Each structure stands twice: as structure tokens, then as C-alpha cells.
Amino acid sequence: MPYALTIREKKVKAGKVYYPLHLNLIPKPTPGHGEVLVKLEAAALNHRDFFIRQSLYPAISFKTPLLSDGYGTVIEVGPGCTSDHILHKPVVLTPCRGWAADPDGPEDYAQFSVIGGTEPNHHLGTAQNYVVVDESEIELCPAHLSPAEGAALPTCGLTAWRALVTKSGNAKPGRNILVTGIGGGVALQVLQFGLALGCNMYVTSGSRDKIAKAQQMGAKGGVIYKSQDWPLALAKILPEERPYLDAVLDGAGGDIVLKTTALLKPGGVISCYGMTLGPVVDWAMPAVLKNIELKGSTLGSRLEFRDMVNFVREKEMKPIISRTVKGLDCVEAIDGLFEDMGAGKQFGKLAIEI
């Protein structure tokens, strides 16, 4: 029988929540009307999954398979499907539901949800051998991607695409873009998208090795954010003909507005897709006087997902993989991926080759 990986409910000490992984035997599902059966071949982790294990995410489920990123092959189509051409083809799954095309946000926030490990989608998660989804919730995987690379794409790719292309307004040749915390999946996808679009990309990191790797990919330069005067160091490496930032792409929050206001052009944009340092961003009067725009950015619409996948196909881009483990039943090895994430060791995505 096939497996599904969930978290197991367990009494824990206050302030020390970290639910253990639990491997379940489940029956092989059957697609219904308008649905397809996908045999999953790879799945990838996101910080969201780490937060779920710490009970830091809403509506967590102890029954729903974990993970929102998956690559697999369609092995069966249900009655009424119009996608017979997709049979036996490799696909990637959309990581969220309930957002069709509105660039401002989900058409009805009450209907929006992300798959994997939460209550709204009881059987939907990519940490399992098989999954049934509506035929509209898959895209043909770009042919140049491996299973692990395909699995690495959905959540980070969609988040990065929306934050840079839809929200920043500066995904244009010659624009100076700063990506903070390089090494995480979203930050690396922003870097790759920006480079492909002709932007001048700059990065921050706590690791010189990660900055060096980003420069090998094409970043113009980078600075260590652990230094209090890192904005001054960044200012020194900006081009003379354009000595300012057009946009900042940030997933940490904290004092990012205070740190970058002087670097940003008037009307510059900070596109914030996460707040790993805490749930509050400092906002100061100098940013108001300079007309800085702080824009929140989440996942994205079904339309943005299709556009992102097509862009990856056209440019033959490959998501960066930090490490993979083999086997959904290798729970201890998968725990090691979560440990990498918790320690910030990864440069790229952490994936399971199912």
C-alpha cells in the first residue's frame, strides 16, 4: 500500500512544540469526475512546513499529508476529463487553491488555501505516493527539469514570481534589485528570475560562501547582513550611473525598511514575501518622506503560476537544489532536511525523491 507522511499529535512542553513526523499506510485513491491521479515522484520542503511542525501555522492537520510542492506523472484520468493528452506526462502541482487571476489577491479570501498539512484540503499534500487533483490544478512540467527540480519549483517559484514581477514593478533590464537572505528557495528564484529579466541583482547573507555562490550565478555583489553598516557596504558596490536600489525583495522583515530607505530611489519598492524575524516591520518617517512603497506579497494566482512555469520553460531555468533524500519511508533522513532548514544550512531547496 502507498504511504503518506503527516505530523503526529503529541503532548509537548509549553514553548517547545515540534511535532514528530509520522508515516501512514493509506489506500490508493481513485480519480473522480474531472480529476486525475498523479503518481508523485518528488516533493520539496518549504519554511511553511517547518512552521507547521512548530504549530506556528493556522489550521494545522494531523491527518493531511505534509508539503505543498510536488512533481509526478499522471497515470489515470477520471470521467469527464478534457485533458487526455496529459496522461503519462510529467506534471507539477499548483500549491494553492481558490485564486484564479486577480492581480490584487484572491477573489474570495475565504476560499483561498495552501495544500499540505492543513485542514482546508484534507487529502491534498505532496508527501505521499499518489494524489488526486482536479485536472485544472496541474501544469506540464518543463521537459528540462528533473523530478527533484520540478518539485522545487511550485511554491518558491510562484512566490518569487509574484513578489518580483507582479508586485515590485521593477522587473526590467538595468534595474538594481536587492534580494535579502540569499540561500533560501524563494530568494534564489528571485535571483534567477531577475537575472533572466536583465536586472542587476545584489544579495545579502550571513555567509560569505552563499554570497560567493550567488555571484557565480550572476549576482553583481553582496554584503553580510550581520554587520550593522551593511547598507554602507552595499552603497559602495552599486554602479556609478545608477547608485541606488530600485526595489528590495525581502522575506525576513524586521528593520529592513530602516536599513534600506537611504539606498532606495524615491518611490522605491520593498516587496515583502515573508517575515521570518518576527511579525512586525519597523516603519519610519524617512520612508514616508521618500515615498517608499512597502508591498506585501504572498503566493499567487493560478494565472501567475502558469506564467511562471512557462517562463521557466522558455528560459530553461533550473531551481537550485541544496540536498535530497531518497524514499518517503526514510523518516529519519527527512527529519534531517528539516534540521538543515532550522539551522539555515541550505543553499537552495530541500527535496524528497519519492
Image: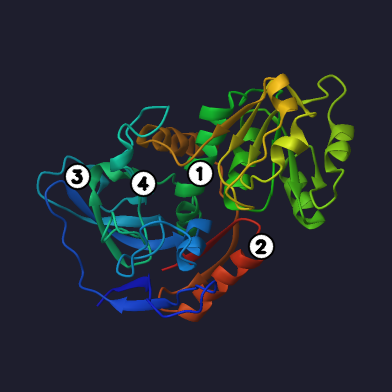
Residue denoted by label 3 = 84
Callout 1 secondary element: helix
Mark-to-mark CA distance, 3 and 4 = 23 Å
- For the C terminus, the image quarter is bottom left
Q: Nearer the viewer, residue 115 or 185?
A: 115
Residue 312 — which label?
none
Left or right of residue 29, residue 321 in this image: right
Left or right of residue 349, residue 195 in this image: right
Instruction: Mark 3: give few (<14), some (14-19) or many (20+) Cα within 10 Å.
Output: some
Q: Is residue 240 visible?
A: yes
Sequence order check: which comes first, mark 3 or mark 2?
3
Q: What x and y, as percent, mark residue 39?
A: 30, 62
Instruction: Mark 2: give few (<14), some (14-19) or many (20+) Cα within 10 Å.
Output: few
Sequence order check: which comes first, mark 4 or mark 2?
4
Between disc 3 and disc 4, the foreground one is 4
Q: Quadrant of residue 129?
A: bottom left
Q: Is residue 147 above or below residue 215?
A: below
Callout 4 secondary element: strand
Residue 157 — which label?
1
The three-letter amino acid code for the residue at tag 4 is Cys
Mark-to-mark CA distance, 4 and 1 = 13 Å
Confirm or deny contact between disc 4 and disc 1 (CB under 8 A).
no
Residue denoted by label 4 = 96
- For the N terminus, the image quarter is bottom left
Sequence order check: which comes first, mark 4 or mark 1?
4
Residue denoted by label 2 = 344
Confirm or deny contact between disc 3 and disc 4 (CB under 8 A).
no
Callout 3 secondary element: helix
The three-letter amino acid code for the residue at tag 3 is Asp
Q: What x and y, as percent, mark residue 178?
A: 71, 36
Callout 2 secondary element: loop
